[in-house]
Image: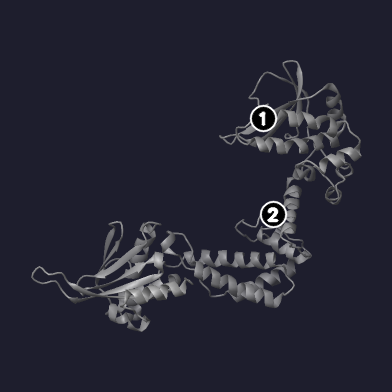
């Protein structure tokens, strides 16, 4: 039964951990009271289960049985979710078997029911005995105080075991160095103080190998996914470079250890790259400051438009990619750069990994529509898009000739696109 906050008196509580269930008396009835899970407002839910005086006597005198009962009831609380009712009958049915039965019967019960392993590990359970199903014996050294880090490490090791991963001493210390021993999704950091001092020199040699492998590499931004997104192609190339170097130098390292080092290096390279310009602003220098476009317009499929001129504060490429980062979305993946004076432009199709160059063959005269030549090309990631944009900004459509092949036949281009994607 779920309760809010009725009038009640605390009959028994343990001082070591505020989460261990209390025994209260409410409306003259003894109840086990425990907080578990959260409601829709992310506040802890409070559950109660009616118990007898005999149950209270065991809870009061036997820490092991108290913790085992908590472990057995917690899955029922989890099943209640954020607003469901506790299965009180199932909870009551656990009281006698857990609190009053001989140890062998308790062990047998825990082989049949769901129970919360992490609570027992946090309170000092012998992990090897738990794994062998001897839960009562495993709790002989139980403590009222909880070591949550111990429980987290045990859960992390179980997840690795489920994947068939076995860590050696160096593997484990590398994961501790990056802060990913407990949670592989955590953004890696450098935490040398968390490493066993005896193994820290070996860890640092692995890190040094990775640093040398990716020295000078860059992970640019991907404006197609906003102002902070990294270029996946750059990231994958950096990760592959680091991975190969570390595996070559340390072939016995576990895959988890190699991946965490690669993740650390990629994160740091990406962070350094963010301090560099969005675009390699070398257009003016590359052409001696005299050639290149003087004015361009940038548009998207949603009516957005920006006009760039050479006397502005940024180069055309940098301005264009900033425009893309601000406007790109799942339903806005076509962007155009147009030189109206020259009658030419390029159109980037992010959804199709392609670009079209558009050249005016004959301007519209006497009310007739202009005629255009449209040619298509497949693009390989952000690096490919950046190269084509830079080339167009410097020299227009003519400068794109060497970046072919260009296809004017739409059907031929679609066949090439399907071949690339294996369709």
Q: Residue at x 17, y 71 (%)?
A: 370
Residue 36 shows which numbered tag? none
Q: Residue at x 30, y 56 (%)?
A: 302
Marks 1 and 2 close (CB-CB < 8 Å): no
Whole-angstrom CA distance, mark 1 to mark 2, is 28 Å
List the residue tagged with mark 1: 46
Q: Nearer the viewer, residue 47 or 17?
A: 47
Camera-nearest label, 1 or 2 = 1
Is 210 above or below relative to 169? below
What is the x, y in percent for residue 285? Answer: 35, 78
Decide if residue 177 is on the left or right side of residue 391. Answer: right
Q: Residues within 10 Å of mark 1 (few under 14, many from 20)?
A: some
Q: Residues within 10 Å of mark 2 (few under 14, many from 20)?
A: some
Going from the N terminus, do you reach mark 1 or mark 2 first? Answer: 1
Decide if residue 46 is on the left or right side of residue 268. Answer: right
- Residue lying at the far left in this picture: please name it: 366
The image quadrant of residue 418 is bottom left
The image quadrant of residue 74 is top right
What is the x, y in percent for residue 314? Answer: 33, 67
Q: Is residue 287 visible?
A: no
Q: Residue at x 32, y 74 (%)?
A: 410
List the residue tagged with mark 2: 182
Dot 2: element: loop
Decide if residue 143 is on the left or right side of residue 160. Answer: right
Dot 1: element: strand
- Residue lying at the far top in this picture: please name it: 28
The image quadrant of residue 362 is bottom left
Is 163 above or below relative to 3? below
What is the x, y in percent for residue 155? Answer: 73, 51
What is the x, y in percent for residue 87? Answer: 70, 31
Q: Nearer the viewer, residue 261 or 421?
A: 421
């Amino acid at each position: 039964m779920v309760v809010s906050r009725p009038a009640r008196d605390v009959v028994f509580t343990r001082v070591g951990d505020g989460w261990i269930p209390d025994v209260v008396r409410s409306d003259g009835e003894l109840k086990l009271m425990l907080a578990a899970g959260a409601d829709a407002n992310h506040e802890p839910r409070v559950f109660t289960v009616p118990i007898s005086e005999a149950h209270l006597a065991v809870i009061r005198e036997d820490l092991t049985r108290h913790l085992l009962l908590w472990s057995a009831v917690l899955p029922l609380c989890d099943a209640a979710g954020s607003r469901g009712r506790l299965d009180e009958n199932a909870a009551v049915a656990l009281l006698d078997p857990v609190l009053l039965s001989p140890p062998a019967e308790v062990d047998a019960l825990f082989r049949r029911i769901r129970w919360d392993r992490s609570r027992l590990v946090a309170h000092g359970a012998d992990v090897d005995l738990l794994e062998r199903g001897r839960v009562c014996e495993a709790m002989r050294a139980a403590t009222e105080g909880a070591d949550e880090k111990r429980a987290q490490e045990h859960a992390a090791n179980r997840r690795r075991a489920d994947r068939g991963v076995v860590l050696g001493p160096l593997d484990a210390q590398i994961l501790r160095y990056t802060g990913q021993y407990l949670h592989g999704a955590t953004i890696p950091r450098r935490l040398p103080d968390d490493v066993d001092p005896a193994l820290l020199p070996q860890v640092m040699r692995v890190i040094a190998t990775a640093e040398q492998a990716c020295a000078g590499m860059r992970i640019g931004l991907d404006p197609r996914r906003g102002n902070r997104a990294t270029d996946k192609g750059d990231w994958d190339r950096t990760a592959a470079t680091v991975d190969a170097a570390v595996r070559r130098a340390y072939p016995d390292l576990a895959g988890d250890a190699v991946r965490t080092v690669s993740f650390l290096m990629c994160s740091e390279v990406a962070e350094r790259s963010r301090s560099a310009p969005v675009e390699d602003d070398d257009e003016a220098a590359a052409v001696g400051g005299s050639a290149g476009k003087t004015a361009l317009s940038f548009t998207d499929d949603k009516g957005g438009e920006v006009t760039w001129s050479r006397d502005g504060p940024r180069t055309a490429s940098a301005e264009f990619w900033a425009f893309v980062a601000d406007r790109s979305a799942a339903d806005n993946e076509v962007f155009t750069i147009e030189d109206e004076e020259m009658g030419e432009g390029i159109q980037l199709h992010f959804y199709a990994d392609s670009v079209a160059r558009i050249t005016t063959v004959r301007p519209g005269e006497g009310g007739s529509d202009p005629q255009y030549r449209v040619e298509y090309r497949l693009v390989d990631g952000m690096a490919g898009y950046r190269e084509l944009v830079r080339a167009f900004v410097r020299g227009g459509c003519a400068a794109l000739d060497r970046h072919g092949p260009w296809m004017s036949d739409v059907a031929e281009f679609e066949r090439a696109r399907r071949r690339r994607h294996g369709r």
